[in-house]
Amino acid sequence: MQRFMITDTSDVVRKVGKRILSELDFLVCEAGDAREALTRCQAELPDYLIVDAGMEGALDLIASIRAMPNGKDVKIYYCVVEADLRKLMAGKRAGATDFLLKPFDRKILTAVFGNRAVAA
């Protein structure tokens, strides 16, 4: 089963994302801030990671994960509220794999990740 981490300051976003992704057969954990996410990633890297762009330390978190052994293998989705080119480019420079628009819902998460849970 593939591991997924949702890092967002919003409890609601994490809970909704966790419920949807768990139903897609991911093993999902949550982190409420960048420090907690980094600590969890140091213990065990997820296969997928959603990082809230509005969270303090989001870009540093992405860069830190990319610098870890096997950190290049993590698929990191930088979650933005609007398609702001500056934010998107900053996320890409830090090492984000792709982007998600927030708020996401079942339809979006299923479209992006639905066929990946059992792929490994």
Image (cartoon, grey):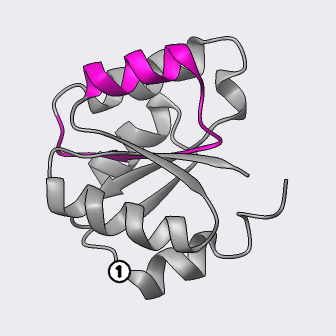
The answer to whether residue 73 is left or right of residue 52 is right
Q: Which residues, given as a range, are shown in magenta?
A: 34-55
Question: Mark 1 falls on what kind of element?
Answer: loop
Q: In which quarter of the image is residue 58?
A: top left
Q: Is residue 36 magenta?
A: yes
The answer to whether residue 2 is left or right of residue 32 is right
- Residue 25 position, x and y percent, is 64, 66
- Residue 101 position, x and y percent, is 34, 68
- Rendered residue at 46%/81% (across/down): 108
The answer to whether residue 117 is left or right of residue 52 is right
Q: In which quarter of the image is residue 90?
A: top left
Residue 83 in sight from this viewpoint: no
Q: Mark 1 points at which residue?
A: 105
Residue 103 in sight from this viewpoint: yes
Q: In which quarter of the image is residue 74?
A: top right
- Residue 106 position, x and y percent, is 42, 83
- Rendered residue at 40%/61% (across/down): 18
